Image: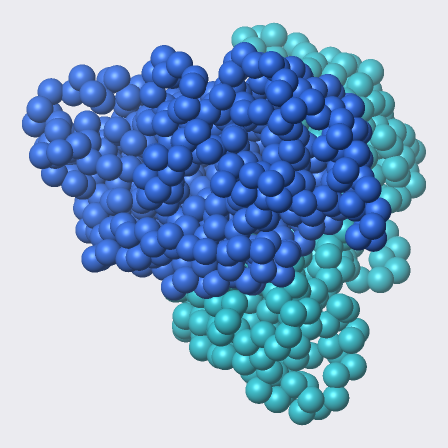
Chain colours: A blue, B cyan
Amino acid sequence: MHRTLLAVSLAALIAGTPAFAAETKASPAMVQSAASLRDQALKDETGWQVLESLTTEVGQRLAGSEADARAVEWAKAKFKALGFDKVWTQPVTFPKWERRSEHGEVLGAHSQKLVLTALGGSPGGTVEGDVVRFDSLDALKNAAPGSLAGKIAFVDVIMPRAKDGHGYGIGSRVRTTGASAASKAGAIGYVMRPAGTDWHRNPHTGMTRFENGVKPIPEAALSNNDADQLGRLVKLGPTRIRVALDCGFNGTYTSQNVIGEITGRSKPNEIVALGAHLDSWDLGTGAIDDGTGIAISMAAAKLAGGVQRPQRTIRVIAFANEEQGLWGGRVYAESQKDKIRDSQIVMESDSGPGRVYEFGGRWSKAADPAMAQVADLLKPLGVAYTPGKGEAESEMGLMQDAGSAAGAFAHDASRYFDLHHTPDDTLDKVDPEDLRVDIAAYATLAFIAANVDGSLGSGTLPAPEKPKK
Amino acid sequence: MHRTLLAVSLAALIAGTPAFAAETKASPAMVQSAASLRDQALKDETGWQVLESLTTEVGQRLAGSEADARAVEWAKAKFKALGFDKVWTQPVTFPKWERRSEHGEVLGAHSQKLVLTALGGSPGGTVEGDVVRFDSLDALKNAAPGSLAGKIAFVDVIMPRAKDGHGYGIGSRVRTTGASAASKAGAIGYVMRPAGTDWHRNPHTGMTRFENGVKPIPEAALSNNDADQLGRLVKLGPTRIRVALDCGFNGTYTSQNVIGEITGRSKPNEIVALGAHLDSWDLGTGAIDDGTGIAISMAAAKLAGGVQRPQRTIRVIAFANEEQGLWGGRVYAESQKDKIRDSQIVMESDSGPGRVYEFGGRWSKAADPAMAQVADLLKPLGVAYTPGKGEAESEMGLMQDAGSAAGAFAHDASRYFDLHHTPDDTLDKVDPEDLRVDIAAYATLAFIAANVDGSLGSGTLPAPEKPKK
């Protein structure tokens, strides 16, 4: 846009906003600008270009791996190339976990390879033992101490597919708590049906942590196909397997949160923050988890801040090491703890590239009119309005817990857990049209939040009923 | 069935068949028996049980591997358990090819792992070089001698999906002839987009053979996702990769064709033969290729020969080492070359578990009435009649070339090449209902062929226009 035209449109926008509104509400001109922005986003290729660039040029970016540093450099350069006027970093230090090799096999008369992957946090080691199958996590947790001595525990629970992704609650609990339960009962190893909904011979990795005082044991996820196979073999008779994992913690590593800003024109200290995590698991190229989030955040911020410089600062945080425990998110939240009232809103995209179908979140009652305006703007995208429902995801959940207003978009997760944490998390799985719709939704919210007069309530909201983390 | 009832029904069957028919045609009673058999097959679980047993208890069974011998023992035991009254073997000797490990990676600024698998017949070796991409096989074949010195050739052709599987003609040509062309132009290695239609990070292996006098070079197939990625990287600039394959030929191995028979009552020397191959590639468990064929053949023969003992012998051949060049098929065809007139018909299932949709093949004009009766019996299964179209598959193609009458069933191959020769060739991919329909079709043809008076024309048919192999 020509600079003169931009100034005129900016003036119109400001003129339309009453100075001391009892309610936070956008002017008609601002709503009109937001509608144009939304429609522009539906034709914009920035998000796809960001996603293709990250997943192709960096590829996998396991926290602490050689690619972690390349991802940080990539993010800094990309923010600059996209026109963010301020780019800075925050150091994030964490224990470095490495995967070097992994093998599984059935021994004896039915000798065959098992496709499996070490779970994040697993110690290395080679174990051989008879498999004891449990058809629920509770059954394993009820195993008597010592009852699994010399055995390898196998939890065989199928994770249900769901649009809202709720099946992951079940699957991830098997992953995060199973190995501790197995170890407490004396098992020498732990394998699980994966926290994933596909049948494509791809195991799903993911983080685990052993309870204090519990002896860490090698732990791995099978593919769903291999879990089927192991279940059939166990039914035929005693089944001995070998799990050989070369992996484990190895010192510490310091990565960076990479932060890009489009500085606000009139309220530069007030922040509209979009977040996503820059790290990924190492099996795929991190396209859906969370390259998509990086693409959505960068593209939506650029769109929302690019047409006419916003009143508030629009900030994108590319977080370090989400996968192994929100390490970057905790550093960021700590850095913001005295500035919660300046956090106009936070939002995060970390549930894949599925099309956004609900918009909700948490803000003051006074902000309802503005958020209803956002909801109206999103209606043509097929997004339902669910005020009070939904929470900021992942790292931004920490900001919400600290009192920030938060926007929450529900993405269709029906296919997300087919791919999540697998080798199959690759660029071809992202639908460019869905990605554009998602970006349009985030950009619309960011634009209104950055320009509307009045706070959305950060620092004045009642404490959440149950802290998220 | 009670023995007395069986004798009565058998008498009816024989009485209904004129002794010297000018045309080969089944009696109404025989057609009625075939219809009952077909309907029985649609409720029978034998095929699924065979398939589950083979893929679970043996798993992968690469020709010459430790599992090859287990598969032979499995087949002998299974024939006996199913009531085949004669079980015998034919030794089959071939060069043993072994896969030990395989790794691929992009080097330099965009360092990342590539998912790939060695092609069967590849020599071992580690090569590093810049990638030269070709968007067609012809483009590689036209490369000047020496022009690829020190380079790794990459043929990047997408194989089309098709119900009749014709895309495999394109994909398999890239696989079987690409590495020779690359070597002739001086390349030190060869990688290809796989001969496969899925996007699930699973590479497709398969056999290759270097032309005489051409220096063998390491050759591998990427997954389609990795081919996408390599294509994008090459577009960004010079891309150096490392391909490290530990594999190769290692002496010879003697496996066995395993043959089970239900001996014919009145014409035991005349043979209705159903074939499939017992070996598989090593990445999956050989469910669709060709566990399905083994299951269809064993179950269809048992059904066709089990209700009332057939006039002719029904024989099932579980062939050794099809994948590396029809080794078992050639031994079998050689053993039958002087008995072609005794081959009532051959049929083979080696295109997966997709539902049968066409029945055709090759037989004498005199046999048309009987084959039309088979077609009528298959109509309720949704199988179209395409006389003169289709050929016996794989090993049985050799029998057809030698002059045998042949039945040919077209299976829906729309999804077959998503899975073919990949880790994803596992039991869960087979639809039990499709499998039952397939077995019903093969059993119906086998039953009529085994009991109808008169030959289907083996040894009197005109030579095929173009030998199949």
Residue at 82% over, 42% down:
A8
Task: Name the residue at 72% across, 72% down.
Answer: B134
Above or below residue B3? Residue B445 is below
Which residue is depicted at the point 61% across and 8% down? B5
Percent coordinates x, y for residue B344 in the rendering: 73, 41
Q: Is residue A256 visible?
A: yes
- The answer to whether one can see residue B449 in this image is no
Using the image, determine if residue A309 lies above or below residue B145. Answer: above
**Relative depth, front residue between B340 and A102:** A102
| Coordinates of residue A188 in the picture (x, y in percent) | 15, 39
Q: Is residue B91 left or right of residue B228?
A: left
Q: Position of residue A460 (x, y in %)?
A: 43, 19
Instruction: Please identify the quadrant where the C terminus of chain B is shown.
Output: bottom right
Q: Does residue A423 appear left or right of residue A359 in this picture?
A: left
Q: Quadrant of the N terminus of chain B?
A: top right
Q: Residue A302 or A135: which is nearer the viewer?
A: A302
Splitting the image into 4 quarters, where does residue B240 fall?
bottom right
Q: Residue at x 8, y 24 (%)?
A: A145
